[in-house]
Amino acid sequence: MTLPCPSAQTVSKYNSQYHKLFPCVPKDEILMKVYSCALLRDILLQGRLYISRNWLCFYANLFGKDIKVAIPVVSVRLVKKHKTAGLVPNGLAITTDSNQK
């Protein structure tokens, strides 16, 4: 199920949360979009993707443990469609300049 992109008012609300979760992101970096999504690691982690001009940041909380991924946009080398469960092309695979996926 695809959820609609949050309104500008909602994004503004998430901006302070974004900066608290990701102190590596400069305070003047403005949040552009927030999406409810999942990160596929060993298991599927439900969370949020925060997108700003220079950062892609994912946050999830699993059993009280914070899972954070912060990717500087300048390090992104490839973004391509990915099939979840090998069937549905509703995912993205992001490869960085250090060949991390």
Image (tube, rainbow, N blue to C red):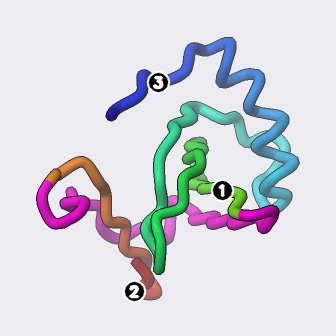
Residue at image point 60% right, 56% down: 58
- Label drawn at residue 99: 2
Left or right: where does residue 6 sit relative to residue 22?
Answer: left
Q: Quadrant of the N terminus?
A: top left
Q: CA distance from mark 2 to mark 1?
A: 23 Å
Disc 3 designates what residue?
Answer: 5
| Residue at the extreme front | 63
Identify residue type, mark 2. Answer: Asn
83 drawn magenta: yes
Disc 1 designates what residue?
Answer: 60
Q: CA distance from mark 3 to mark 2?
A: 29 Å
Q: Quadrant of the C terminus?
A: bottom left
Residue at image point 42% right, 22% down: 4
Left or right: where does residue 37 sit relative to residue 95?
Answer: right
| Residue at the extreme left | 87
Q: Please state which of the two labelled residues, at mark 1 or mark 3, is closer to the viewer.
A: 1
